Structures are given as C-alpha cells and as structure tokens.
Image: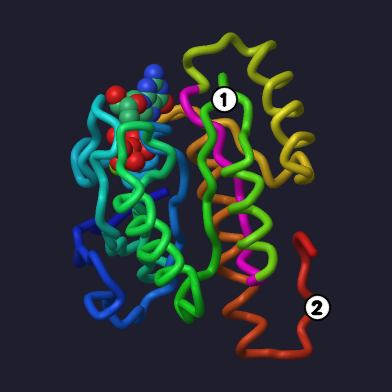
C-alpha cells in the first residue's frame, strides 16, 4: 500500500474542536495499551507518527491523521483507549463523552476498527461497544493485535474463538501485528472495501453492494 503522505491533521478534546471531515474516516477503538497507535503507525509505515507508549492511557485526545494515497485522501482517527484501571470516574465519563461525541453522527466516518489483544478474551466493554456501533449502523472490523506473541497455530484458534465470542463472522476479524507487520495488507484490503462501496453507493444508489450486511 503506497502512502504518499501522512501527517497529524488535528487533535481534539471536545466536539467543538473536531475538524470538518472532508476526507472519509476510519476510527480506531479499543482498550488502552491494546496497540491502536502502533497499528496506525504500521498501516502508514511511519514509526512515530502516532505516539505509542508502554504506559497505558497515553492517547487521551482524538487524533486525526490525514493520509494521501494514489486513490485519494482519508483520515485515520486514533481514539483514546478505555479500560485503564488507574483512571478516575471523571476521566471515564470524559472518555465516554468524547468518544460518543465523535462516533455519534460523524458524517465522514466509514468504519470503526475495534482492536483486541489476541491473547486476551473480549469483555463486556467490547460487546457493549459492538452493540452500540451496530445500533448506529457503523461498520466494524476487529483487528486482533500483538499476534507476534503467539505461534501460528494458536493464533488461528484464538481468532476463531474471539470471533465467536463477539458474534462476528470470521472475515470481519483480522489477525495483526504492528511489531512484525502481520495482517497489514489484509487490513488495508478490508478498509478499502469499506471505503469503496459507500462512495459508489452514494454515486449510484441502485448499485448492488457486496460485503457484510
Ligand atoms: P493508548 O494510547 O494508551 O490507548 O494505547 P494504544 O492502544 O495506542 O497502544 P500503543 O500502540 O501505545 O501500544 C501499547 C504497547 O503495546 C506498546 O508498548 C507497544 O510497543 C506494544 N505493542 C503494540 N503493538 C504491538 C505488537 O503488534 N506486538 C507487540 N509485541 N507489542 C505491541
Ligand atoms: Mg495510543
């Protein structure tokens, strides 16, 4: 996937600061420390575009990264992570408000990528998020992260288990490693499928649409 340019467009802590959303957007959601910023960097082949950290809760604002490819521009949106135990109730409420403000009625949003550590079981948090996204008809892909921590066999078994636990078809659940670059072309293909049909559908309302229901 050839990336012509990648830059931080803007950062926001509340709705009033959100950019206008001129390019289609893909949002990255998931537990703190799951690897959102790392996966985003790997997708665009930039080591430190999005800041990563071994300290959970690093990304507390919404970050918009504008990416140019030959096929056009898009924004990858790094949302703050949830589920970090050391965070106060206030901080949790703030997270919810900010993330909902973004996901709710964001015209430019084409799909959300929910990240889940391949070694961990999905929790009520992920199930609630999926239900919430489904209600709002936001297409979701699940990226299982840190696949380099497991061997090939256990990897596929875990992917099947997690897909089942989340109630998603296997093709919506992709195994990735930001560290080793595993699953990155596959993730781009899946993202492009989300970016394409919507545009075509808007231009030609009668066109048959493939992909998930
Ligand atoms: P918050 O911003 O706190 O929500 O975290 P995040 O989801 O953005 O996680 P981040 O990308 O900062 O990564 C957290 C830690 O996991 C860092 O120490 C990364 O180096 C590590 N990590 C991320 N992806 C991978 C991966 O594919 N493999 C391995 N082994 N480690 C990874
Ligand atoms: Mg981050």
Foreground residue among 6 and 97: 97
Q: Nearer the viewer, residue 165 or 171?
A: 165
Above or below residue 87? Residue 158 is: above
Q: Is residue 117 left or right of residue 127?
A: left
Left or right of 99, for residue 152:
right
**Where's residue 36, x and y in %?**
39, 41
Query: Ligand 1: does it lie within 8 Å of the C-beta at label 1?
Result: no
Give neighbour class at mark 1: few <14, some 14-19, many 20+ (Cα, 10 Å).
many
Q: Where does ligand 1 appear, by image quarter?
A: top left
Q: Nearer the viewer, mark 1 or mark 2?
A: 1
Dot placed on the residue nearer the N-terminal end, 1 or 2 = 1
Res. 180 visible in picture = no
Say which residue appears at 41% left-offset and 72% top-offset: 101
Relative to 108, is 40 on the left or the right? left
Q: Which mark is residue 141?
A: none
Q: CA distance from mark 1 to mark 2?
A: 34 Å
Number of the label disc, if any, that sits on residue 208: 2
Which one is nearer the viewer's eye here, 195 or 125?
Answer: 125
* Residue 154 x/y as whole percent: 67, 12
Residue tagged 1: 118
Quarter the C terminus occupies? bottom right
Total number of numbered discs in the rendering: 2
Q: Which residues are magenta?
A: 136-146
Circle 2 — which element?
Answer: loop
The percent position of residue 132, horizontal first and vertical second, equals 63, 61
- Residue beneath the point at 29% across and 59% down: 62
């Amino acid at each position: 996937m050839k990336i012509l340019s990648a830059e931080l467009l803007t950062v926001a802590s509340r709705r009033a600061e959100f950019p206008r959303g001129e390019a289609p957007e893909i949002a990255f959601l998931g537990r703190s420390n799951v690897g959102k910023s790392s996966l985003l960097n790997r997708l665009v082949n930039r080591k430190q575009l999005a800041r990563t950290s071994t300290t959970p809760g690093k990304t507390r604002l919404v970050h918009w990264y504008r990416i140019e490819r030959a096929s056009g521009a898009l924004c990858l949106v790094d949302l703050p992570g949830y589920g970090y135990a050391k965070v106060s109730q206030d901080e949790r409420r703030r997270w919810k408000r900010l993330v909902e403000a973004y996901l709710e009625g964001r015209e430019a949003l084409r799909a959300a990528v929910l990240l889940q550590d391949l070694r961990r079981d999905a929790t009520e948090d992920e199930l609630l998020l999926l239900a919430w996204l489904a209600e709002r008809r936001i297409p979701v892909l699940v990226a299982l992260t840190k696949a380099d921590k497991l061997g090939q066999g256990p990897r596929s078994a875990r992917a099947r288990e997690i897909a089942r636990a989340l109630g998603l078809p296997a093709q919506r659940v992709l195994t990735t490693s930001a560290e080793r670059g595993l699953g990155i072309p596959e993730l781009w293909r899946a993202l492009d499928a989300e970016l394409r049909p919507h545009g075509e559908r808007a231009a030609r309302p009668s066109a048959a649409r493939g992909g998930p229901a």
